Image: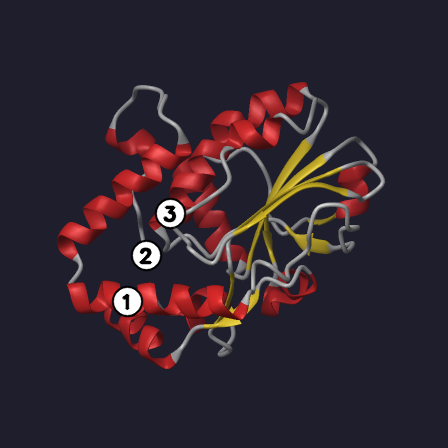
Amino acid sequence: MKWRSLEEKNSTTESRSLREILAERKQKIAQYVPATTLEVHARVIAELKAEGLAEHSLARGAHMPEFSLPDQNGKVVSSAEFLGRGKLVVFFFRGRWDPFCCGQMEAMNRALPKIVDAGASLVAISPQTLKQSFFMADQHKLNFPLLSDAGNSVARQFGLVYRVPEEQQAIYRRAFINLPFTNGDESWELPIPASYVVDRDGKVLFAYANEDYAERAEPMCLLTFLI
């Protein structure tokens, strides 16, 4: 369940792009994970792409569904509250067990000062429990809200939710990734990773969703929509 943070591995500031960081993690995983396991993950991604999950998710120009969710400290916050202060950057991630999510979290944390300087807010949403979000924020020294979306209710409104197939469930169990425990339900549902920039009126200025969990929106790309 614990993926070491960049800060734990070295004290220097990470200057590479998120794409480079995730590519390195993907390469390292390929060195240690059996080819048969990688084939299952690749097949699941291909099937989700064939279904057009990302293609049919919330798109640029649409209006973001309103939400109210608890953060890692148990405080309920709302999209209206954030939009009342300015633009909002919101991204959906799978959980603290995912090394690609951890890389994205740390990259967004480094971009946070620029987001704040632009007068915007940043929130991350996942189906993991409040306790898991608290552990993640503490471990990776995150300075923005991690919202717990029980049952993927908000992610479902964004069109991001899928059920982990049985063969992939078996792989996760063998790797001690216990989603029923981590997410607090037996659904085995996850959101595909997605990032949005939303204007104060709730209009989506930027939308990026990808069935491939190793691909995420670059923080600098999001920042261009905050100017």
| Residue 160 in sight from this viewpoint | yes
- The answer to the question of whether label 3 and label 2 lie on touching residues, with beta carbons closer than 8 A, is no
- The answer to the question of whether label 1 and label 2 lie on touching residues, with beta carbons closer than 8 A, is yes
Q: Residues within 10 Å of mark 3 (few under 14, many from 20)?
A: many
Q: Residue 10 at x, y = what percent?
A: 25, 26
Q: Where's the N terminus, which quadrant?
A: bottom left
Hey, what amino acid is under mark 1? Phe
Q: Residue 86 at x, y = what percent?
A: 78, 31
- The answer to the question of whether label 3 and label 1 lie on touching residues, with beta carbons closer than 8 A, is no
- SS for tag 2? loop
Q: Residue 83 at x, y = what percent?
A: 79, 38
The residue tagged 3 is 100
CA distance separating discs 3 and 2: 13 Å
Hey, what amino acid is under mark 3? Phe
Q: Which mark is residue 176?
A: 1
Q: Which mark is residue 90?
A: none
- SS for tag 1? loop
Please determine whether, in this image, residue 120 is positioned above or below residue 25: above
Which residue lies at the image location 41% right of the left edge and 52% below the top edge? 96
Q: Residues within 10 Å of mark 1 (few under 14, many from 20)?
A: few
User: Which sits earlier in the primary sequence, circle 3 or circle 2?
Assistant: 2
Is 140 positioned to the left or the right of 109 in the image? Answer: left
- SS for tag 3? helix
In this view, the residue in front, 176 or 53, is 53
Task: Name the outermost residue toward the front.
Answer: 50
The residue tagged 2 is 1
